[in-house]
């Protein structure tokens, strides 16, 4: 069934990106709805919201990183195949769970259980992204620049997955070590130039 | 009134797709808001959410299938007519009811009544899609490939409607037979290559 | 300040349309969040939701009509001016109030007060639309077809405003006469061909 | 890592704008969800909502101004760099906090604390916007018109920041002086032609 579509070429990619943009924009924005203003007056009551706010910041950075990488990855795609559509849908599904585990993390004040669930939810999109990347590599542009890009991001993704995986046992000692692992991965992706990036190039 | 628009040709189609993408992205994402984190701590309390989570997964796959088919169907449209605009609006309306019946299904733990309502809500977009397909066929590209595409999806849509219709009496025996019918239709559409697809080609 | 932008021409219009599509897609979809599934089991309990559902259907049709007209109106725009940006923002603001008055109408079971508020909320976008139309006419394409389009929609918009205005005193007799006025306007816009349309051509 | 992307040129900018449009459309629309219809019947009960409604209007105008300026600023961008992506993400993050402080302002009836928080939340996007502007200036078009545009908006942004900063101590006297400062800034941006604009040209 994908055959007809594949023949159409580029235009289809634009609409897959537009739909992904829509879903990611909603995922990144609805998390702020968890920031319920305290009923009591007084700015000092605002400080009780810090775990919800911190969880929101971490997850915002996390989804933003996925958007930036998704945006770059799709600039390498040249054809819309059935496998591309569904691996992309799976990635968006795993990312749609982030608001849930973020709310859980914030409401349970970074408890050990909530941190475990959070790190687990962060691993799912990482796995879906690897699948999507493999598929786009298969259908996408071939060339030295594209290969270098794919090698670099695959290595970076591998390091990120290792840090997450290390974060889960570390979180058993204290949840903050698990959260630190998630923050470290975010920093690695957000600051791609400078020392952090040289690890991957 | 549509005459002026029809003369404009292609650009209008892009905006109909963009609006549809927006609505579908919201429909598919707001369903996750029903996953309320349990107040009590402990990951074992998470298991009480399984019906809500399962309902979310089923409906996510369902709306995703509609997006993929919508995306393919519109690549065959060549003119924006009044009938196209309104049959598309009707399809989006019926799909906007999916979050409601999904919440009902999850909160009532796949009870018989909730399963009936869910299967009924799944039938409405199927009927709206048939109407949209007929209209796009009328205004769209003619040709061997387009005809083959329309024949294949009409047949597939007919089989899907039959399975849903069978699911409603089966759900009277036990709701899970009804849910299995919905899952079977999803599998038929998601896995278009291989044995499932050969039924339609 | 708008001078630089005006010189850029067409591309800007696309982004104004994209933002409007996003806002309208959210406005039309979040209304379904008011359809809360009843806590008690049993499909007979669903019937208690009929006023909320009916209000949703009416408002969905109403916002959909605005999207269709907005889509057509913007195909006549050729330049993005400051006045166009802000009259469009005002239109989107008035439409963003529709979910509120729809929730009010549904929760208060079409009471007289709720119907008054609903009809008043429907008048606001009509006024904003007239302003936007005047501005687009000023900056847009001139020609016989564009003039015919503007004359026809202005006449149709005037008839719609008259019916709404008549609906408010009629709603004092019984709210359903007010709702019937809103439904009549929706029918006039949705069925543009046939007898209803001949009134305007 | 941004190197591959930068070479791609223009298309990337379109997708950054599309994602920003999505986030801004959601931010501007979800604020209306705070307008909960009163449970009691009677239109006189609606007046109790005036602080929530006024807060919504102010914030709608505020986010709309950012969208208009964002739209103009990006028409001057020519390359997508890593710094552009992340300064844009930071701007969207600060704007995503507006619904929270708007809800706080409305629910706490423009109390002094709520007004302080609101003005503080309005300062954050202003700072993020300055950073984004600097980056786009660096990567964007050079030329007399672009320089004039950047000089004018930088001056205007500076005046706006000064008025906000003045609003915080004024709000200690009475919150309404703080709100008046926010309204004055909105008026300066919305009415760019006429006397207000001559201050900056």
Image (cartoon, coloured by chain):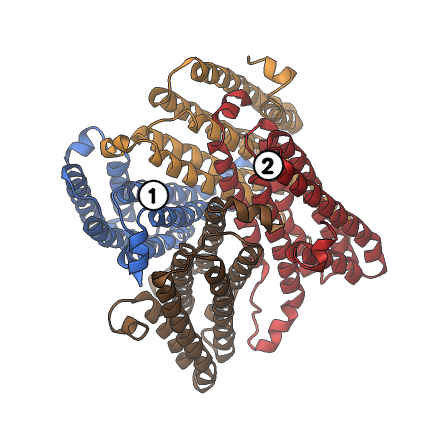
Chain colours: A orange, B blue, C brown, D red
Residue A143, can we see it?
Answer: yes
Which residue is identified by label 1? B67
- Residue D168: x and y in percent read 80, 52
Q: Is residue B64 above or below residue D139?
A: below
Q: Residue furthest bottom?
A: C173
Residue A4 placement: quadrant: top left
Q: Which of the numbered marks, if any, corresponds to residue D200?
A: none
The mark lying in front, picked from 1 and 2, is 2
- Residue B19: x and y in percent read 40, 50
Label 2 crowd bin: few (<14), some (14–19), many (20+), radius 10 Å: many
Task: Determine whether, in the image, residue B108 is placed left or right of residue D85.
Answer: left
Q: Residue at x 82, y 52 (%)?
A: D166
- Residue A125: x and y in percent read 47, 29
Q: CA distance from mark 1 to mark 2?
A: 27 Å
Q: Could you say which is closer to the camera, residue B124 or residue A137?
A: A137
Label 1 crowd bin: few (<14), some (14–19), many (20+), radius 10 Å: some
> Dot 1: what SS?
helix
Subunit bearing disc 1: B
Subunit bearing disc 2: D
Q: Is residue B8 above or below residue C69?
A: above
Q: Residue at x 44, y 87 (%)?
A: C173
Q: Is residue A197 above or below residue B183?
A: above
Q: Which of the numbered marks, if any, corresponds to residue D89?
A: 2
> Dot 2: what SS?
helix
Q: Residue at x 60, y 13 (%)?
A: A198
Task: Determine whether, in the image, residue C38 is placed left or right of residue D71.
Answer: left
């Amino acid at each position: 069934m994908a055959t007809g579509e594949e023949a159409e070429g580029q235009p289809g990619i634009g609409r897959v990106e537009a739909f992904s943009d829509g879903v990611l924009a909603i995922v990144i924005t609805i998390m702020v709805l968890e920031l319920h203003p305290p009923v009591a007056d007084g700015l000092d009551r605002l400080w009780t919201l810090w775990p919800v706010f911190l969880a929101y910041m971490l997850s915002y950075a996390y989804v933003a990183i996925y958007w930036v990488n998704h945006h770059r990855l799709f600039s390498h795609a040249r054809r819309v195949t059935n496998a591309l559509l569904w691996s992309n849908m799976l990635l968006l599904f795993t990312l749609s769970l982030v608001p849930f585990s973020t709310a859980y993390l914030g409401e349970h004040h970074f408890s050990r259980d909530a941190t475990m669930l959070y790190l687990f939810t962060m691993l799912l999109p990482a796995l879906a992204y690897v699948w999507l990347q493999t598929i786009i590599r298969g259908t996408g542009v071939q060339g030295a620049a594209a290969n270098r890009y794919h090698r670099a991001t695959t290595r970076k993704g591998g390091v990120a997955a290792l840090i997450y995986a290390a974060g889960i046992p570390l979180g058993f000692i204290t949840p903050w070590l698990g959260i630190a692992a998630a923050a470290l991965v975010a920093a690695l992706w957000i600051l791609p130039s400078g020392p952090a990036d040289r690890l991957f190039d």
